Image (spheres, rainbow, N blue to C red):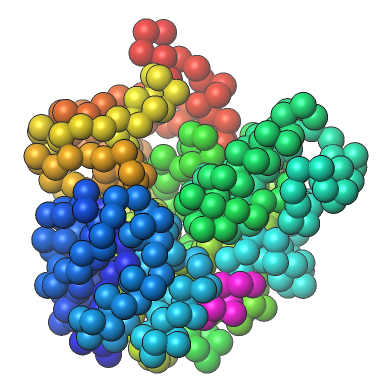
Amino acid sequence: MFSKVLVANRGEIAVRINQTLRAMGIAPVAVYSEPDAGAPHVTTAEQSVALPGNTAEETYLNIPRIVQAALDCGAEAIHPGYGFLSENPNFARACQEAQIAFIGPSPESMELLGDKLRSKDIALSAGVPVVPSSPECLPGDPAAEEFVERWGFPLLVKAAAGGGGRGMRLVNRQSELDSGMETASREAQAAFGDGRVFLERYVANPRHIEVQVLADGSGHTIHLGERECSIQRRHQKIIEETPSPILTPELRQRICDAAVAVARTAGYVNAGTAEFLLDSQNGEFYFLEMNARLQVEHPVTEAVVGLDMVEWQLRIASGASLTLQQQDIQPRGHAIECRIYAEDPYRDFVPSTGTLLRWRPPSGPGLRLDSGVAEGQEVSIYYDPMLAKLTAWAPTRELSLRRMEVALSQFLALGVVTNIPLLRSVVRHPQFQRGEYDTGFLEWNPAVTDPHP
């Protein structure tokens, strides 16, 4: 096992990784930009290395600087977290070349599955259905024109690399296509250092279901169940839960088996997540992509299966076998996660910046907070506006919802505008409480995003 690991990230995920590293007796090393000096992910580490600059491009996306920081501090491994360089095969390869272990899949697997286009080919070879899409293309390319001619509008422009809703645009008509592709490409380049985009058929109002998998170097692969991620704004998840309230036992088995088949076909190693669109009318599902990293929403899975996924990532990356068998995974209870963002949900989710004057999260039975901020900290313009994740576990979905509703009502965050009022509105909504929702929930419930309905 490693004795020192550099965490190439910031915010709540870096804090969360630091916690597991310390629990395992491993020294965590933080990297930080100038705006992040003194942030919780720095203060919870045993050692820290400054990355000169403010922007992500200068700091958390700077491969040479991060690898050199690991070499300078004597780290044996790097954990990339999510976002930033977590799905960049060039980063994983740079770690290999520097003889630093990368906590995640191999560069080759990342190229296969971290790239949405190539991952669809893998899924098809595994016998798993996919959403129709174009090859990588630019505005005016024949491939784009052919796709539009066959499938028409609306369609999605999507980043070939990365995820989290960045580099994605819904295009409703021909006149919007070129600008949509250019905007998506710029977003993808800024967020992931890769501006490639493609077109995908738009599936109206589906359910967004994903399956967590774990695999070791010998090919042993298991799943940890599904997560329902259909409450989204701008194609980015804001509430996740497990188990999904819509899946029957038979459909759950089929979709989880499909995720394992994709991972095995790709020779995937470490933690990964297969994402699917589910047509709730006919029960058909389609493979979307494989996220070759730890997911933002992994705490809900940890809550119901009782595992520390970061610990297993570290063990697998150190060469250990996955000793868990599929029958060992027995989910218990229900967990819901809400993402707390510094943004105004009533002004088109515009990010909010400023000093966090009060930060008093709730506490109580079944609650878990993953936070990357502290009272008095400056919320800057340079990075994603997510402040924290609040998870509520209970024996049943009804009790889990009640715990979340009470916890959100007790959450005090002053100094910046947050989306907590929106989250409360969703959790209290009768259709959400009945589990009758899809990815268009916020669009077909405008009162939820209206402060004065």
Where, by quadrant of the figure, is residue 12 drawn?
Answer: bottom left
Point out the image quarter for the N terminus.
Answer: bottom left
Q: Determine if the magenta segment contains residue 106.
A: yes
Which residue is painted at 35% across and 77% down in the image? 67
Residue 50 as seen in the image, left or right of residue 278: left
Q: Nearer the viewer, residue 32 or 222?
A: 32
Q: Position of residue 240 (x, y in %)?
A: 42, 46
- Residue 443 screen position, x and y as percent: 55, 24
Which residue lies at the image location 26% right of the left edge and 46% below the top edge?
Answer: 388
What is the total number of numbered labels drawn onto the structure image? 0
Helix, strand or loop: magenta stretch:
helix
Name the residue rendered at 30%, 30% in the picture. 352
Residue 286's x, y, as percent? 70, 54
Q: Is residue 63 in the magenta section?
A: no
Q: Quadrant of residue 453?
A: top left
Up-down: is 318 above or below 371?
below
Decide which of 356, 360 is in the foreground and name it: 356
Whether residue 334 is visible here, answered yes or no, is yes
In the rendered image, the residue lying farthest to the top is 452
The residue closer to the viewer here, 417 or 214, is 417
Instruction: Answer above or below: position of 359 versus 320.
Output: above
Residue 240 is left or right of residue 277, and the answer is: left
| Relative horizontal placement of residue 11, taking residue 423 as reference (left or right) | left
> In the rendered structure, which segment of residues is drawn in magenta?
105-112
Residue 82 seen anywhere in this rendered image of the structure:
no
Name which residue lies at 44% across and 86% down: 96
Tell me: 180 left or right of 410. Answer: right
Q: Position of residue 350 (x, y in %)?
A: 39, 27
